[in-house]
Image (spheres, helix red, strand yellow):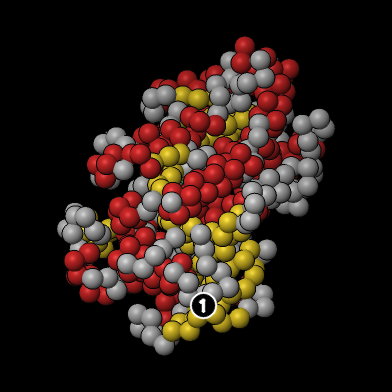
Amino acid sequence: MSALKVLSVVSELYPLIKTGGLADVAGALPGALAAHEVEVRTVVPGYPSVMAALEIASTVVAIEELWGGPARVLAGKAAGLELFVVDAPHLYARPGSPYQAPGGADWQDNAVRFAALSWIAAQIAMGAVPAFVPDVVHTHDWQTGLVAAYLTYDGRRRPGVVTTIHNIAFQGRFPASLMPMMGLPSYAFGMEGIEYYGGIGFLKASLRFADRITTVSPTYADEILTPENGMGLEGLLNSRRAVVSGILNGIDDTVWNPATDPLLPAHYTVSSPLGRRLVRTELCRRFGLVDDPKAIVFGVVSRLSWQKGLDLVLAGMDKILALGGQLVLLGSGDADLTAGFQRAASTNPGRIGCTIGYDESLAHLIQGGSDVILVPSRFEPCGLTQLCALRYGAIPLVSRVGGLADTIIEANEMAIDAGTGTGVVFSPLSQEQFEGALTRVARLHADPTLWRRLMRNAMKTDVSWSRSAGRYADLYRGLVVERGA
Ligand SMILES: Nc1ncnc2c1ncn2[C@@H]1O[C@H](COP(=O)(O)OP(=O)(O)O[C@H]2O[C@H](CO)[C@@H](O)[C@H](O)[C@H]2O)[C@@H](O)[C@H]1O
């Protein structure tokens, strides 16, 4: 079997640049696919952190003028990933996040920045770099949604395109007035093209033109076909239903490994769990909590946004405290939630601790030291935190939506004994059901033997990429066969 060449195109990539789970997936999948004879190169913008990490690189494409300035594509390696970096300083050499200025406002020219990324990727897809002509192009989310449109309107023979929806809430909608700047023929602006509710729709374009549409769990693949969860794209998705599927995310089990994790103060495994107690003690110390072995330490690592349902946690704080619980939270985002959690922490010192910001090593400490990880999302395409929690023996308490429903199995006593139960799952999303789930988890925690078995079930769950990488490899190969025929 000769290696299949895949060009992945993405706006963030762990460990070089990350705002959320998209980066984790794009960073881990190439390594997992290598085991399936799939060779991945990733096209990524030349943000400052990417440029700084790039090892020996050579210029493989040079462009005098790319939407307002010169650009070049550098082929090189960083953090073990094979990359094509789009070095266009006028678009990407900025402080702040990939999408926002340091003050938190979206960059004014995001449409142009990600159209440029997509256009370059389309050129590489069509052979601009003879040393790597891909068999398949894999795009992710709205930022790279125009790749499929550029390839289609170009008209030349093109590789098949797979697009993955990581979150349908982010759609990349821009004013129609930008159309002349998109580098597409004017007739592309229509319902059968990239027009979306009177504007330009980047995600819409990818759903219209990609050969395969995937999302990150089977349940979310069903959910986005409905008006409740399709966020306006359900009609288009239903018309393309035959090519829509869900492939569960995994996590990088070398980065997330409690037996070796350099970000943990002690190590542990399923069969030798004692080190976990030391991690928990350090977690309590870091958050100023009383180190009480009987208390249940609830942990949250999350973007603070409406999607994640953390308002339920805030409203359920009295319940958590009444159950003898404590809470540690790490997150950033919404100002009201931030203020709410900060207030809760300052009125309950020793029992609630909160850190606002983004902190990779603290995220590992919370996973390694908490007893329970809370993920009460309103919708969740897959979710990675509950997968990390399983691996680290923190019991996930989740809402029954999307990938949370697909990855966590309700743990009553029978299910724990049978070796299947791994967490606590509630539905529908309401304060009452959430608090009912808190009571259930507290009941399980009160029985140390049961809890140990539950932790063992959680830690033995396969949350690696191995199965899902095989599914992507099959999808790519099927597409190559179809397009070659
Ligand atoms: N303050 C903080 N400090 C440190 N680390 C933090 C952090 N806040 C979050 N993280 C980490 O970032 C990642 C977020 O993963 P999620 O699955 O929750 O992704 P997100 O909702 O961003 O992405 C979308 O894409 C992913 C990938 O497909 C889907 O799993 C998900 O459902 C979908 O909403 C986790 O690894 C988490 O530990």
Q: Amino acid at mark 1?
A: Val
Q: Which quadrant of the figure has residue 68?
A: bottom left
Q: In the figure, is residue 158 to the left or right of 319?
A: left
Instruction: Give the labeled residue for mark 1.
Output: 73
Q: How far from the left and from the top, in percent, is residue 237?
A: 30, 43
Looking at the image, the residue that sits furthest to the top is 414
In the rendered image, is residue 79 in sight? yes
Q: Which quadrant of the figure has residue 141?
A: bottom left
Disc 1 C-beta below 8 A from ligand 1? no
Q: Nearer the viewer, residue 484 or 465?
A: 484
Q: How far from the left and from the top, in percent, is residue 433?
A: 43, 22
Residue at the spot 67% in from the left edge and 37% down from the top edge: 391
Q: How far from the left and from the top, in percent, is residue 250?
A: 59, 43
In the rendered image, is residue 172 in sight? no
Residue at the spot 34% in from the left edge and 72% down from the top edge: 112
Q: Nearer the viewer, residue 478 or 424?
A: 478
The residue carrying pointer 1 sits among few (fewer than 14), some (14 to 19) or many (20 or more) residues within 10 Å by Cα, namely many
Residue at the spot 72% in from the left edge and 44% down from the top edge: 257
Q: Nearer the viewer, residue 438 or 150?
A: 150
Badge 1 element: strand
Q: Nearer the viewer, residue 364 or 319?
A: 364
Q: How far from the left and from the top, in percent, is residue 187?
A: 18, 66
